[in-house]
Each structure stands twice: as structure tokens, then as C-alpha cells.
Image (cartoon, grey):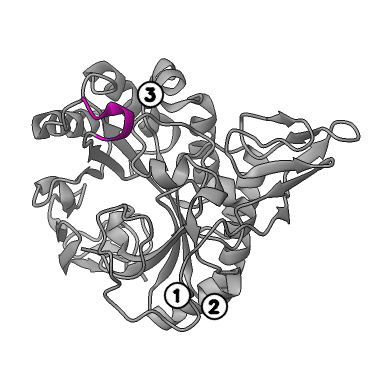
Amino acid sequence: MTSGLCLLGVFGCSPKPAKPVTPSVQLGQKGLVRPVRARWFSPLDKLRVHCQLCPKQCELENDTRGPCRVRENREGQLYSLAYGNPALLQQDPVERKPYFHVHPGSRALSISTAGCNLNCKFCEVWDMALVAPEEVYAYDMPPKSVVAHARASGVRALSYAFGEPVIFYEYMADVAAEAKEAGLLNLLHTAGYIQPEPLRELSRMIDAANVDLKSFDPEFYQKVVGGELEPVLDTLRLLREENVHLEITNMVIPTLNDDDATIRRMCRWIVDELGEDVPLHFARFYPLYKLSALPRTPVSTLDRARRIAMEAGLEFTYIARVTGHEGENTFCPTCGELLIERVGFVVGEMRLEDGRCRYCGREIPGKWA
């Protein structure tokens, strides 16, 4: 059970906050929208605009929105309707994002708004991400208020997660700047569907990113996700190039992206293009949204995927959403010793010293200090 604030009853969190709500946080309001001028667009003519934030590259007529539901052309100027109005504000263990190489056992304050630039048939937060801002209850939380609440809550980081942070880019960037000044970490969990230029700018403020690599099959992306694979691969390359700590999540969905050949290609690509030390999380799928007729992922399938990844040379391969599985633990790839014990979101003994294996001295990538 998580603590903090949770709206919409999603993510399995308690309907009541486990900690007192600070006075700066007001009750949610439905239809809370305060438009701000978007940062990534160009005019096409007097009234038409070209959005340059994500690979969809939408050309919008006057008084229309993109498929993300939050970017609107108003008389030749593009506005974001996802600013200062998070539909989700809650504390979580950092392991829930999941981050296994970022301050294990610490907590982060997660925020997200309505809207998404993809349309996954297995979306876990469809009642927040696949609706317009006017359709959800949202908190009135400008960037300074978010950071003040985070500091008062004693969390280690701000996390832009659960929905799709790309679509509230301006809000995220301003919160991240405030958080960085306050000494908080900025964590990004994203589908990675963003153009290189805005991502490179954002990378200067992001300490760690977990990218959902939903499959290594372009057809899966087109039919099940509503996007393209290649831009996500470009995002992964760029984050690595910018020295942002990177972890990857792959949700294994029975019959759709669980075949050995595709998983093997994905793992080999990660090793060749990003490096063998990038943590990879295989997450268990649970039936929901438009894929509610599918079964949950068998543990044996996750075990097989993990074995394929290890055979491909990946040094840190994890199993997510199977509490008590050995794949929740971190092992030293050099000497094989157990370095971090986990059971769900509970972290046991850590056998690291200054980011190195206590036994053989091997450096372990991550944010530890």
C-alpha cells in the first residue's frame, strides 16, 4: 500500500492519505485548466501550427487539439493545457517506478497530468492518461508548490511517472528546475516518444530515466501502442549519450510480445547500442483495459525472458511485479555475490561501498550517494 495522495483510485493506492496532507495542497477540482504557451512548435501560416514535441509532428488547425488531448492551437499559437494541474500526486518507494539502481529504499513524490501521446491497449491508467484535462479532478499545484510539498514530505526525489510526462513537458521542465535548485533528484519514467531536441534539453535536469521499451517489434508498436518503435530507440540512445542514468522496462504480454526471438533481438540491441550494464526490468502483465481477456504473464515466461537477457550479456536483469522472486535482487556481475536484497518494495541489506561491490570492488552503475 502506498502513502501520500492518490487521485482516481488507480495504482492500487489507499483512498486515504497515510500521512497528513500539507496545507499547501488543496482538494482536487474538476476541469482545472490554465493554458501556458507551448515551447516546441512553429507556425505554418497565420492560424495553423506544427507541434514539434513528439514524433507525431501534428499539424493543427485553429481551435483543434492533438491526439495527446492537451496541446491546443489557439489562433496560431500552441498551448499546453497540462500545466500546474496534476491529476496524480503521491508518494511511492523508488522501487515502484521501477528504479533498482537509484537510492534503494528511498521515496519519491510522483506527479502526472491527464493526457498521453500514445494509445496503448494495455494502458494501466487509461482513466487519467487517455482523457482530456477537463475530464479529471486535478490539484492546483504550480511548480514551486510541488517542490515545497516534496520537501515537506521528506522525499528524496521528484518522479514524473505513471501517466506520460512528455505531454506535460513545460510543467515537468519547470518543476524539475525548481527541484534541482532544492537539491532533489528528478526521475523520469516515460514511453520515450519524444523528439531529440526537447529530450536533449530536458536531459540537463533529469538524473535518471526509466524508459518503457514495450516491444522490439515495429508492428506491435503500430497496432498495440499507436506509435513507432524507432523514435523510442533514438530516445534510449540519446539518454545514454547524455549520461542520464538509464533503466528499461519491458512488460511481457502473453501472445503479443513474449516470443523468444523478439526478446533476444531486443536484448542484443541493448547490449550493442547501450551497453551490457543497463538494468532491464521484465514486468508482469495483468489483464486490463482493452486487453482484459488475456491472461497474466506466467512466471515461467518471465524466467525465460530473464534467462535470454542474461545469455545475451545483460548484467542486471530483473523481474518486476512478482514479489519474492529472486529476480528482484541485485547481484554482482563479476563475483556473483548478492548486493541488494528486495522483497517487493522492501529493501534489505545493501552490500555496496561507495557504489562498488563490497566483495570484489566492481563498480555498479547507478545513483547511490
- Span of residues in magenta: 288-293
Was residue 290 drawn as part of the magenta stretch in this picture? Answer: yes
Q: Is residue 198 above or below residue 29?
A: above
**Quadrant of residue 316 in the image?**
top left
- SS under mark 3: loop
Near-viewer residue (259 or 33): 33
Residue under label 2, please give it: 182
Residue under label 3, please give it: 216
Count of picture labels: 3
Near-viewer residue (248 or 176): 176
Instruction: Tell me how far mark 2 sits from mark 3, CA to CA.
Output: 38 Å
Instruction: Tell me how far mark 1 sits from mark 2, CA to CA.
Output: 10 Å
Marks 1 & 2, CB-CB < 8 Å contact: yes
Q: Amino acid at mark 3?
A: Phe
Q: Amino acid at mark 2?
A: Ala
Q: Residues within 10 Å of mark 2 (few under 14, many from 20)?
A: few
**Quadrant of the image containing the C terminus:** bottom left
Instruction: Tell me how far mark 1 sits from mark 3, CA to CA.
Output: 36 Å
**Quadrant of residue 346 in the image?**
bottom left
